[in-house]
Image (cartoon, grey):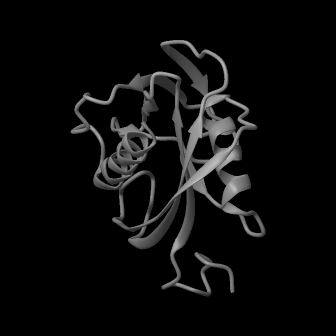
Amino acid sequence: MNAGSPCAPDAPVLKACACLVDARDRLLVFRHPADGNMQLPKGTIEPGESPEIAVRRELLEESGIDYAGALQSLGTLDRECEAGVEGNTHRHPQLWHLFLMRAEGTLPESFPHTATGSPEEEGLVFVFRWLEAGDSIDDFALPYRQTIERVRAALLLAA
């Protein structure tokens, strides 16, 4: 059975989350127009797809950034996703695979991108910006706050 399939109701839905930082260790984030919350690029790992391939695909679909650089695993994060959150119709467990990515070259301070690849998000315009180390993360749901804290801890260790 595939994780997250209707035949495996207790299996977590596997997700890949892109934690892209620039040369100034700022994290790429966006406001989701459907729910109004701040998010990181993230999405479902497709059947037969590795988390490493999925995170690159999700970043491309949600931001337009085709990332070919190194991936640093930040581990996994368990999440119980409530019904009605982020377009989900039923409560279910998720397992997020988190990856730190270093931007290659310079990206704009902010930029829009029209999402592709997901029936729920196809055509939505995400406006991206950079989150500084000292910026508040109150506008993010708990799993995103936990992910941002992991990114910040990894960046401090690397400094």
The quadrant of the picture occupied by the C terminus is top left
Image point (69%, 36%), residue name: 60
The quadrant of the picture occupied by the N terminus is bottom right
Q: What is the tally of numbered marks visible in this picture?
A: 0
Q: Nearer the viewer, residue 79 or 21?
A: 21
Question: Is any part of residue 147 visible from this angle?
Answer: yes
Q: In the image, residue 100 lies at what x, y percent?
A: 54, 45
Q: In the image, residue 78 lies at what x, y percent?
A: 41, 69
Q: In the image, residue 16 lies at what x, y percent?
A: 58, 55
Q: In the image, residue 21 lies at what x, y percent?
A: 51, 32
Residue 25 in which image quadrant: top left
15 is higher (above) or lower (below) than 100: below
Quick check: 86 left or right of 142? right
Quick check: 6 left or right of 109? right
Residue 105 in which image quadrant: top right
Q: Nearer the viewer, residue 79 or 8?
A: 79
Quick check: 152 left or right of 44? left
Image point (64%, 50%), residue name: 55
Image point (60%, 36%), residue name: 62
Question: Is any part of residue 118 visible from this angle?
Answer: no
13 is higher (above) or lower (below) than 136: below
Q: Nearer the viewer, residue 141 or 85?
A: 141
Image point (26%, 28%), residue name: 135
108 is higher (above) or lower (below) than 117: above
